[in-house]
Every structure is written in C-alpha cells, then in structure tokens.
Image (spheres, coloured by chain):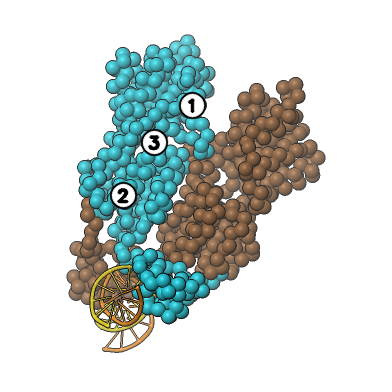
Chain colours: A brown, B cyan, C yellow, D orange
DNA sequence: TTGTATGCGTTATCAG
DNA sequence: CTGATAACGCATACAA
C-alpha cells in the first residue's frame, strides 16, 4: 500500500506511442487528431494505464470543475435532500461537489469562501445564516433562501405564497382559529416570508390568528408554555397550526400528544419543507413542499453560468401542499 | 461578477516586498525566515490580498489534502451522521472531504475510485455494496462495514456483539419468543454478523427465535405477510423483535401499529444504528447504537496514516444499548 | 494535422 | 538565511 511513485505522464504516453506530447493532449481532450495517431495514443494509454493528473490540468486551465456547497449540516433531512440534488445536478455537468459544513458557525463560512480564492473551486453555492457575510464579487456565488443584493443571485422557493397557501388550506379544512409558530435566526431572509404570507392570507380571509416566534437561542420549552397558556378545559384555543418547518412541526406534535391533544382531530398541523424521513417515504407531517430538485437545478445552472450578469438576481420557485396525516385531508 | 483575471501570485508578492520568490514561499509555509524579511513579505501579502493557489501547490507537492468519502447517499440518517463525523475528523487534520454518492450504483463506485488515480484526492474512505470492487493497491483505501482482504483496512462496529446484546436485552426484559427481521444485500459483510450474534445468544440462553430475512429486491410487503401469519387471536407470536436497522424498525413499527399491536406493551422492538431523527434528539427506537464518531475517527486516522502497512486490517468498535421507547425500559 | 516550446504557481534544490 | 532556478503535468499558441 505504498504510494505510487511514478504514475505515467503524458510524456510517457507520447514516448510509448512515438508521437508528440501535444498529440497525446489532443487525443485526451477530444480535439481533432489523425486516425492512425489517435489509435497509437489510445493503445499507449491502455498499455501504461495512464490517467490524467488533475492538478496539472487545473493549474494550466484555471478550472477546477468543482463547486463548493456551503450548508449548516446534513443531519436535517431538508439539507440532506438539498445536498443530494445539488450533487446530482453538478454531476450531470461533470462537476464535483466540495461539501462544507458550517454547523451555523459564521467564522467557518468565511473560511470556506477563501477556498474559492485559492482556486480550489470554481464557484460557491451557499445556504448561510451569517448576518454580515462579505461576498467576493469576483467569483460565481449563489445563495439559497437569502437575498444579499442584486449582484448576488438568490434562489428560494415561494415562501410568501407557501405561507398563504397554508392559511387557505387550514381555512378550507374548517379551521376557525389559527396560529403560526416558528423558531429561527432573527435574520430577515426568504423563509421569514412564510409568516408574512400566512398573516396576509389570514387577514384577507378573516381567519383569526396568533403568532409565536422564538429566536434561535431561546429554549424550546417556550412553545410548551405558549400552548399550555392557550388551553382551557383541556381544549386548545387553536384548531389550526402553521409551523415554520417540518422539523419544528414534528416536535410540536410530540408536545401536543403529550398534552392529550389529538392531531388532526383537535388541531390540524401544517409544516413547511416537505421532509421525508428516510427518502421517498410519505412526509412526516402535512406540509408545504419546497421544490428541492428545482432549487438545486437553479443553483447549479446559475453558479455555472458563464455570463453571471445575465442571471436573475432572485429565482422564486413554486411550492405545493402535501397531505401527511396531520390535517383532515 | 466577472472572473478575476489576475490574482496576485508569489512572484507579485516577491516583487512588491522586494525579496526573492523562495522567501515568500518560506514565509507562507512557516519555514525559518529573518524577522525583517518576514515582515516585508507579510505586509506585501496583505497589501496585495494574496492567497496561495491550490493547484500550483498540489502539482508541486503531489498532496491534495483531500479525501474522498464514498457513500450511498445522505438521505439515510445513519449515513448523514457518518458524513458529518468524517468531515469533522478530516477538518481537524486540515483536510477537505470530497463527497461521492453512489446511490447503490456499482458503476459509479468504480468511477469514483478513478479520482484517486487522477490525484484528485489523497485517499478514499468507502462504504460500498459492490460485490466485486477492485481496489487499487497503490492508494490509501479504507472501507466501512466491509472486509475485502487483509491489505484493505476495514472499520466496523461490533455487529456480532450488538446482535447478542439485543438478544440478551430482550430476554432480560421478559421476552419469551423472539424474531430477527432484516432486509439488505445478499453480500456477506460485517452487518450480516448482527444476525449471527443474535442467534448465538438466543441459542445460548434458550430463547426461541425465528429469522425473517429479505433480499434487497424483494417487496417490503413480505414483512407484513410474515407478521400476519404469526398472529392468532389478535396476538403476535413474538414478544420481542430485533431488527437489522433502525430504519426498518421504524417501518415495522408502523406496520404493527396498523395491526393494532402495541409497542412495547405487546411486543418489544430493538433496532440497530442509533439514528436520531433531526440530530441530537432521542433515538427513534430502542436500539443498538453504533459509535459513529469513533468509526469516523478510525477511518480518517487510518486513511491518513503514512504507514498503512502498520494499520490493523480490521478495526472493531464497541456498541451500546440505548432505550428509545419501544422496549419496556 | 502534428511537433515544439512556453508558462500556469508552487516548492525544493542548489549556490551564495 | 536568502536568492536564483529547475521541475511538477498539462494545454495551447505557434511553427512546421
């Protein structure tokens, strides 16, 4: 298992085939080469088991064919799906993915961005929560769910529309009193619009609602207090809940069950994201599904676009409602 | 957003600082340099905003400081955790991770291995199901859960011990009739030993058991048939189940609940892996926990070891039982 | 079409 | 300790 010292190089192949170095290069890169020459080279390549050396090529061309994807982690199934689809979209274009986990650490995010300057990657796709991230303006950079400025393309789903969709669905399913629950960074990003959309639709339809928003540091138990304080005679004041993410919805439902409040009989719950627990199973809750695959596609085609100036600064993709057992349909 | 054409190079820094190229290199790599020279160089670096170019360095040194991790996907939480911890272990050693998803496609696995030959990565950690994978003997290669030969180091948890542990735990919790359920590839790999360990302990303790093993292609509904055929008078013939993975356990439990069989009152269930749904929450089932972090540590330190010959060909790590609500403790 | 020669940015090996 | 210079492996402009 000692490291191979002398991997064959193009010069070796050229010598073996009795042709010039440039010819070998042309064969490898699919440039026009005479039939006879091509054959000689291809045989030599096979004989020697030649493989091109990536660093040499990269140094020469300045292209790495690698994109960094910066994401908090892969534990959250929504992120996991994103990683999955971005990788597929990149692979389709013969690109590698360098995955960078921030674990919500803002220092880390900044470090990862250096990698682009080190010419380790050709571009960056980032899902970041750093409030004051400085984005280099000389490398392709695409963000997910976070609008920085018109010069930094952002891809997101229609969070506002999704919030409104949830409100309308709850109303249609017979709810008469709703609440919106969320936890997250204080940062104003695209997902913040879920709340605005929800409120907007509730107001429009005359559906009474309350909002309970926790900031990232605050203890989860606040939700329990909130819910308990809205229970009288073992009955919850709300018969419809819209919750910022499926993950939180999942936790809230556990809480409700612990309080002997039935879902969906007593209260209907709609989450956001469209998480599937182990892949293509049914969703864990009734939910507003983000079009993960299209988000990934959009990110990749944007970051790889050679004329970034011609790219939309905000790509907004449609969401849809999906039944997942926690509503009456 | 146009691509930066002229990133400053070492030569630029050298000129700016009025020193030789080599001196700049020595400063950057922390080699001994006179105080005055070092200062001049560091200032020049700051003035120019210099960043080293990775491809140049890699071409010269032959080291990429990158390891490929080959894994089916990141949708399965167990894999997601593995990715997570391997990344941490690599980062600790200033290494990047190139993540490669096989989606259980054996062709893909072979392609990824080429990347090492292209000097894109220094080594490979792989969790593979390809029955006849040819492993290059000239690059550092570590497998998880799969023993190839003494020359290919394998890291796994104590699957046999875990199976036995599950059997003993069920017995201790009062079970009098057990069953082992699994689904997976026909491949004989380390996880296959879960079954052997279970059987061995059952036999030793005189605990009656049955085994129901499905192969990868077979429909999931076979489990339902199996369970139904073991129900008489609304009572299941088993009061203890050991299931190959938490994922399957999760599915089986849904099945049982659909049959009005209560878990853990009527039947206790123990899974394998130690999956946490969204990270550090409680486990989804009572389970035998794999030491993911230690597995990751072992993989990384092995693949990065410069004397691979001195590395154990099989690293076997201890598992533990964890209560997760589906047993009577 | 094919051969030759140069340079991408870095590190390492020499002299000084 | 520092400066000059030669590779590393490849793609490409230019010459033949």
The quadrant where residue B241 appears: top left
First of labels 1, 2 by sequence position: 2
Q: Residues within 10 Å of mark 2 (few under 14, many from 20)?
A: many
Q: In this rendering, do the residues under marks 3 and 1 share a single chain?
A: yes
The vertical placement of A301 against A250, above or below, is: below
Disc assigned to residue B291:
3
Tell me residue A170's x, y (percent). Answer: 71, 36
Q: Residues within 10 Å of mark 3 (few under 14, many from 20)?
A: some
Residue at 63 percent of width and 37 percent of height: A219
Q: In this rendering, do the residues under marks 3 and 2 share a single chain?
A: yes
Residue at 72 percent of width and 37 percent of height: A179
Residue placed most toward the observer, A309 or A68: A68
The residue tagged 1 is: B324
Q: Are marks 3 and 1 in contact (CB under 8 Å)?
A: no
Location of the C terminus of chain A by quadrant is top right
Disc assigned to residue B303:
2
């Amino acid at each position: 298992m000692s490291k191979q010292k002398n991997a064959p190089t193009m010069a070796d192949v050229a010598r073996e085939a009795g042709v010039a170095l440039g010819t070998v290069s042309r064969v490898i890169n699919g440039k026009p080469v005479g039939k006879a020459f091509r054959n000689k080279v291809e045989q030599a390549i096979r004989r020697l088991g030649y493989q091109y050396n990536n660093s040499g090529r990269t140094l020469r061309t300045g292209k790495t064919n690698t994109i960094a994807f910066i994401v908090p982690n892969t534990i959250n199934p929504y992120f996991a799906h994103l990683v999955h689809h971005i990788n597929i979209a990149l692979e389709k274009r013969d690109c590698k993915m360098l995955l960078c986990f921030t674990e919500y650490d803002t220092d880390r995010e900044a470090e990862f961005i250096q990698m682009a300057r080190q010419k380790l990657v050709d571009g960056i796709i980032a899902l970041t929560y750093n409030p004051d991230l400085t984005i280099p303006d000389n490398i392709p950079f695409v963000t997910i769910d976070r609008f920085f400025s018109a010069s930094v393309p952002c891809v997101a789903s229609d969070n506002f529309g999704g919030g409104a969709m949830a409100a309308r669905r709850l109303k249609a399913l017979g709810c008469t009193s709703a609440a919106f629950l969320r936890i997250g960074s204080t940062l104003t990003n695209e997902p913040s619009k879920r709340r605005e959309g929800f409120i907007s639709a509730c107001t429009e339809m005359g559906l009474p609602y309350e909002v309970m928003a926790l900031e990232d540091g605050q203890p989860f138990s606040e939700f329990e207090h909130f819910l308990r304080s809205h229970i009288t005679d073992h009955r919850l004041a709300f018969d419809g809940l819209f919750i910022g993410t499926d993950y939180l919805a999942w936790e809230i439902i556990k809480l409700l069950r612990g309080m002997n409040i039935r879902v969906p009989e007593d209260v209907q719950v709609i989450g956001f994201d469209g998480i599937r627990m182990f892949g293509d199973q049914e969703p864990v809750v009734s939910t507003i599904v983000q079009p993960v695959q299209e988000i990934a596609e959009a990110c990749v085609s944007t970051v790889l676009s050679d004329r970034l100036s011609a790219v939309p600064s905000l790509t907004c993709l449609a969401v849809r409602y999906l039944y997942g057992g926690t509503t009456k349909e």
